[in-house]
Image (cartoon, rainbow, N blue to C red):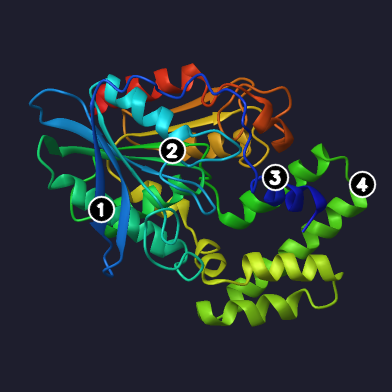
């Protein structure tokens, strides 16, 4: 793994104590602490925010990106899902968010869950939400950030019992995983000042990793397959690539088929990207989304200067995240609310 990606993982272990002016202080809506059961019987905990009034209200489930995220998708001092849920509730839209398995108050084993396990948890959340008082089961959807957008697509098509009316994909890949990750690796490495030789070496290593994942017949074979594929690399590369990709999660997410799922979902989709996103390239994904989205209510939005967490940024480098006061650019919230109020 290149040194910048390794630094990102280290950075995300720490929080920034600086002010976050978008965190709500006056929550003028109902706030419920909730617990729901996954499809395989694991208790997951979270929070449901519901506008005051009899309803029934439209409602969204928020799905977080890669990593051990709590219900707020907390990262380097920011709580983006708290800010999102506040904006939705003030606009008359209920929002459900929850701690991932093995995180916060949720039970279960995070590392053993896998990409599809997290996706099924999202489906369980939406099906639970459809049964709640003052929630309209005919006006439900997902807001997915990054990997959460990938899960939202699959959950909506394959795993939910309740109907999903709309999807909002925020900085979410809509190209195959290998394509997305190789581009991400090159962009992050270039931003970190790595040499062309270092960038090429990592690209070759990632090609080996994805070939190994494709060749592995089952998730339990992923570790041995990836380990063998990178056995001649320096220790840090071997360790990082095997630990991250040689997993059930890696095996499953490598098989993500965005074209299949975008084609199968019949409702409107909003796909939103920032031009400073170094993790999910806006050109690559916005052009793919524009080609694949087919509902007349769908839209692809690219916003200038926003990073992967949809913050206004100078360069988009992960080292900037903690120093930015804004948790989510206000225009993102405006686009999201406008889209959902029109489509739900």
Local SS, label 1 = strand
Label 1, label 2: how far apart the Cα atoms are: 25 Å
Label 2, label 4: how far apart the Cα atoms are: 33 Å
Q: Kindly identify which residue carries mark 2.
A: 169
The answer to whether residue 331 is left or right of residue 47 is right
Question: Mark 1 vs mark 4: which is more N-terminal?
Answer: 1
Of marks 2 and 3, the one in the foreground: 3
Question: Mark 3 vs mark 4: which is more N-terminal?
Answer: 3
Q: Quadrant of the N terminus?
A: bottom right
Label 1, label 4: how far apart the Cα atoms are: 49 Å
Residue 342: percent from left, percent from top:
26, 22
Label 2, label 3: how far apart the Cα atoms are: 25 Å
Q: Is residue 258 visible?
A: yes
Question: Mark 2 vs mark 4: which is more N-terminal?
Answer: 2
Name the residue: 56% across, 21% down: 326
In the displayed structure, would residue 204 be above or below residue 99? Answer: below
The crowding category of the residue bearing disc 3, from other C-alpha atoms within 10 Å (few below 14, some 14 to 19, many at least 20), is some
Number of numbered discs on residues = 4
Local SS, label 2 = strand
Name the residue: 31% across, 29% down: 296
Local SS, label 3 = helix
The crowding category of the residue bearing disc 4, from other C-alpha atoms within 10 Å (few below 14, some 14 to 19, many at least 20), is few
Identify the image quadrant of residue 2.
bottom right
Q: Kindly identify which residue carries mark 4.
A: 195
Q: Kindly identify which residue carries mark 3.
A: 11
The crowding category of the residue bearing disc 2, from other C-alpha atoms within 10 Å (few below 14, some 14 to 19, many at least 20), is many
Q: Kindly identify which residue carries mark 1.
A: 35
């Amino acid at each position: 793994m290149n040194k910048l990606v390794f630094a990102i993982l280290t950075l995300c272990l720490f929080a920034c104590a600086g002010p976050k002016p978008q965190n709500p202080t006056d929550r003028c809506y109902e706030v419920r602490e909730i617990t729901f059961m996954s499809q395989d019987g694991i208790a997951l905990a979270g929070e449901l925010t519901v506008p005051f009034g009899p309803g029934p209200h439209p409602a969204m489930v928020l799905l977080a990106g890669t990593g051990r995220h709590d219900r707020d998708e907390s990262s380097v001092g920011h709580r983006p899902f708290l800010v999102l849920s506040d904006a939705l509730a003030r606009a008359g839209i209920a929002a459900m968010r929850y701690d991932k398995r093995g995180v916060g108050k949720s039970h279960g084993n995070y590392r053993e869950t896998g990409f599809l396990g997290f996706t099924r948890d999202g489906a369980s959340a939406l099906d639970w939400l459809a049964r709640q008082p003052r929630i309209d089961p005919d006006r439900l959807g997902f807001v997915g950030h990054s990997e959460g957008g990938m899960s939202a697509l699959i959950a909506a098509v394959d795993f939910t019992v309740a109907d999903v009316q709309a999807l909002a994909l925020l900085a979410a890949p809509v190209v195959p995983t290998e394509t997305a990750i190789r581009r991400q690796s090159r962009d992050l490495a270039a931003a970190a000042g790595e040499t062309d030789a270092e960038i090429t070496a990592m690209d070759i290593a990632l090609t080996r990793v994805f070939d190994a994942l494709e060749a592995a017949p089952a998730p339990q074979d992923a570790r041995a397959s990836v380990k063998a594929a990178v056995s001649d690399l320096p220790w840090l590369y071997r360790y990082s690539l095997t630990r991250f990709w040689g997993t059930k999660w890696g095996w499953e997410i490598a098989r993500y088929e965005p074209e299949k799922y975008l084609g199968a979902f019949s409702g409107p989709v909003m796909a939103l990207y920032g031009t400073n996103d170094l993790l999910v390239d806006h050109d690559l994904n916005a052009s793919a989304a524009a080609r694949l989205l087919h509902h007349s209510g769908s839209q692809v939005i690219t916003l200038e200067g926003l990073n992967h967490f949809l913050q206004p940024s100078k360069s988009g480098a992960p080292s900037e995240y903690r120093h930015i006061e804004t948790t989510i650019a206000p225009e993102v919230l405006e686009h999201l609310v406008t889209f959902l109020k029109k489509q739900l």
